[in-house]
Image (tube, grey):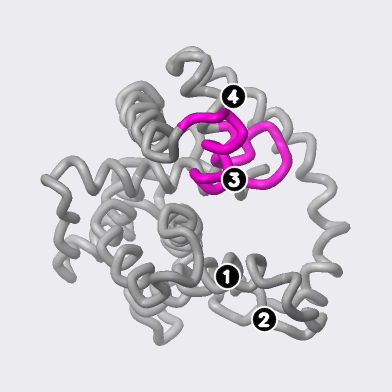
Amino acid sequence: MLGIIYAFLGRIFFFTGAVDDGSSYPKPLSKEDEEKYLRLSRAGDAHAREMLIKHNMRLVAHIVKKYTGAAETDDMISVGSIGLIKAINTYEEGHGTRLATYTARCIENEILMLIRAGKKHKGNMSLSDPVGTDKDGNELTLMDLLFEKEDKVFGSVEQKIMQEKFLSAIGEILSDREMEIVCMRYALKGGVPLAQREVAQKLKISRSYVSRIEKRALEKLRLGLRREDFLSE
């Protein structure tokens, strides 16, 4: 569930960057500003972390363009944003890798995982196939994740509490139709995330209408949610 919430918040961050500057993205930070915000972010400063995320959104868009046609663009943006947030949360200086390089790797790994999942019926995955990276940028395989699963059980209760808190917060901001659509798009109540066309088919409305409602909902949440409450972990 935590990953789903990251996806949803990542989409809000991406949309915010797109609309704030007339469909453009903030320029990358200078080396000095990047170092300053990294230092503050490691100390727990939520604003510094948000600045690092916002000013790296251009990288998400750049990498998504490389895979145009391989999956739904909106879905690649969402999972690419997950990779971006993970990268900002886990990056450590002193390992010989620049932030941009580490971030790009995390973003691309999330997008490749999405593409592989979309092709799951076209071939079998091996337990040794790479599916992502850990906090140090090391490659993770399905076998690694199987062994990690038991350790994550202890975090399930905390994640359940976080889920309920998150749904309650967005439910106070969105209309019933907006809530229904964002929950289906990001699987906030379980299941799997649905593409816009799948949501449109289920609700018997046009895809463009789904897109308009989703964008309006994300903008309302951008203004109404205290994002630091959900990005502190």
The residue under label 1 is which amino acid type? Answer: Ile
Alpha carbon separation for disc pair 4 and 1: 28 Å
Report if residue 194 lies within the magenta region.
yes
x and y, in percent, of residue 74 in the image? 42, 53
Residue 73, relative to residue 46: is it above or below? below
Residue 80, relative to residue 48: is it above or below? below
Q: Quadrant of the N terminus?
A: top right
First in sequence: mark 4 vs mark 1: 1
Find the residue positioned furthest to the left: 22
The residue under label 2 is which amino acid type? Answer: Pro
First in sequence: mark 3 vs mark 2: 2
Quick one: label 4, few (<14), some, or many (20+) residues within 10 Å? some
Q: Relative to 175, is 139 on the left or the right?
A: right
Alpha carbon separation for disc pair 2 and 1: 13 Å
Alpha carbon separation for disc pair 3 and 2: 24 Å
Q: Nearer the viewer, mark 4 or mark 1?
A: 1
Task: Give 28 or 107, whichever is nearer the viewer.
Answer: 107
Element marked by disc 1: helix
What numbered label is drawn on residue 130? 2
Magenta highlight range: 183-205
The residue under label 3 is which amino acid type? Answer: Leu
User: Is mark 4 in CB contact (under 8 Å) with mark 3?
Assistant: no
Residue of label 3:
194
Q: Residue at 40% of width from left, 86% of height from top?
A: 96
What numbered label is drawn on residue 145? none
Residue of label 1:
115
Residue of label 4:
167
Element marked by disc 2: strand
Task: Give 138 or 177, whichever is nearer the viewer.
Answer: 177
Alpha carbon separation for disc pair 3 and 1: 14 Å
Q: Nearer the viewer, mark 2 or mark 1?
A: 1
Task: Give 208 or 99, whichever is nearer the viewer.
Answer: 208
